[in-house]
Image: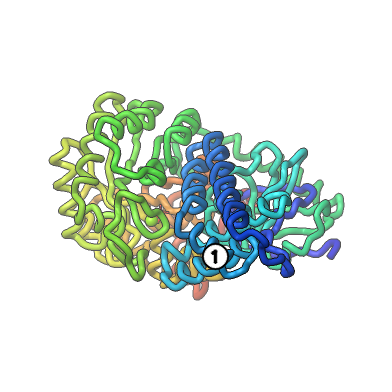
Amino acid sequence: MSGDTLTGVGVSPGTAAGPVVQVAPPVRPPADEPAPADAEAATAQVSSALAAVAADLDAKSAAADEHAAPILKATAMIARDKGLAKAAAKQVGGGAGPATAIAAAVDEYAAQFEALGGYFAERVTDLRDVGSRAVAHVLGVPAPGVPTLTGPTVVIAHDLAPADTATLDREHVVAIVTAAGGRTSHTAILAAQMGIPAAVQVHGATDIAPGTTVAVDGDSGEVTVDPDMALIEAQREHRERRAAALARVSGPGRTADGHAVALLANIGGVDDAVAAGAQDLEGVGLFRTEFLYLSAQALPSVDEQAEVYRQVLAPFPGRRVVVRTLDAGADKPLAFANLGEEENPALGRRGLRLCQAKPELIDSQLEALAIAARDTGADVRVMAPMVATAEEAEWFAARVRAAGLPKSGVMIEVPAAALRSRHVLAEVDFGSLGTNDLAQYTMAADRMEGELSDLLDPWQPGVLDVVAAACAGGEATGKPVGVCGESAGDPLLALVLTGLGVSSLSMAPKKVPAVRFALSLHTLAECRDLATLALAARTAADAHEAVRAAAHEELTSVS
Ligand code: PEP
Ligand code: MG
């Protein structure tokens, strides 16, 4: 394997090299676990194992940041599920030992979740993680997951459980590699937010022996096993050259001929806001408000909401903060914001559709935001998720006006809204392309399905055509259209998007310098030429390659 290069999908840019730690695989019960002599004692063992797992996850959650805490809390809730404990007790009653009983109950539940599909199917990873931790507890072996790290480490896993990703030791992890996972998986989004190079879909990565040195390229998705010194040195030089190049430009985003493209941050809460507020960027292009409430059991009061929004807006007096109203449902379920089970949550009553059915959700948010905006002096603009029609945009704009907020906008992430953007945008002040969902719905490919990464590639010409249609509507109506999906942070794609007419790009703050640098090297006319090249390509790979070949040499030499 030495010197071999495995190729996956780069999801968080940068390079790094270091020794591998393989994330401990799930713990299974021994095949020959004897039937319990005392069923009552075995049942008690099951309960105490599940309780210990829940307590451990709660303790981790208390020490975690705002991204990790709700994920860990949600996983702890699975460990506390009475149905799971009951199912395991039933297995013990049938003669299974405690570890076998837990594993069997988890299998039973997982099959049910998988059959339900959608949101439930996505929770199977969390459920199996809980089961594996509980089995480890019964057997008295170390819990699965990332071991304690003592030095610079490349973490490799089949797929990281949300609880693992959320609690990664940021000081020691220099890169993350997974064999599964997708472009918009937890691993990808959190790695980008932390600025740690990462690659997913690297088949064969889990076969690399622990302790082996690997070099990871989070742009190309390449993982080189036992790299020679020349490669490590080349990566180091490249990092230094890149850092020096990026440091040459600062301030508002502009093309080489001075055309303004605002560079903004995607944030999920107060910590993100404080960090982004201190960086060289022009404000916030997407505040995912639902992230605040992933573990809330009830809709917080207007006063409670206003207090959190105040803290988020405080670092941005006079700067733009685009706040998205609750995007509950599908991959972001909220306990207090749903209309019961659905066959297919990604296509169900989520986002704005849910708020239309429960207007109190959106009205309390808008009221709280109006208070916070007044108190902080931030330039607050509110937008709705999952808008598909002009009527929905009209409904939302009226609500925003009634709350006394000055500007309303819509996410453009449903192909219908992009294709009919002139009518949708006519109702509001701005649009923001959510290319993560736009790719999912245009390509009919579940964004949580790592194996469909190629279809979810925002360079897909079909996706670019839909983006172009949305921009044409922006031009026709004179309404600004930005991008806040992950694609905005890809420097080459940012040029194409600028050429298509977008006026702002919002991304993980760590990605801003590279995008600013890319813009500074190209005129608007050049961006338009690059967009023409991308749209003319037959495949995603052709589009990417055509733009890469035509872009400024200095950009390709440092990216
Ligand atoms: C998107 O869909 O591109 C987007 C920015 O929203 P989210 O990723 O939160 O669905
Ligand atoms: Mg979306």
Can the viewer see residue 191?
A: no
Where residue 386 appears, as percent x and y from the top left, is 30, 58
Give the answer, above or below, for where 337 lies relative to 287.
Answer: below
Kindly give the residue lying farthest to the top in the view shown: 375
Q: What residue do we see at 77% from left, 39% from top? A: 151
Residue 179, picture quadrant? bottom right
Front in this rendered view, residue 38 or 88: 38
- The mark tally for this picture is 1
Give x and y (percent) for residue 486: 48, 53
Residue shown at 65% from the left, 40% from the top: 169
Q: Secondary structure at mark 1?
A: helix
Residue 538 screen position, x and y as percent: 50, 75
Between 112 and 183, the residue placed more toward the observer is 112
Q: Identify which residue is drawn at 49% across, 66% down.
A: 109
Instruction: Say how the picture is coloured.
Output: rainbow
513, above or below 88, in the image: above
- Residue 409 is situated, as x and y percent measured from the top left of the image, at 26, 48
307 or 3, which lies in front?
307
Tell whether 192 sits left or right of 466.
right
* Label 1 crowd bin: few (<14), some (14–19), many (20+), radius 10 Å: many
- Quadrant (top left/top right/bottom left/bottom right) for the N terminus: bottom right
The residue carrying mark 1 is: 105
Query: In the image, 195: left or right of 269?
Result: right
Report if the beta carbon of the residue with label 1 is closer than 8 angstroms to ligand 1.
no
- Is residue 290 in view? yes
Q: Nearer the viewer, residue 428 or 312?
A: 312
On the rendering, which quadrant does ligand 2 occupy? bottom left
Residue type pointed to by label 1: Ala
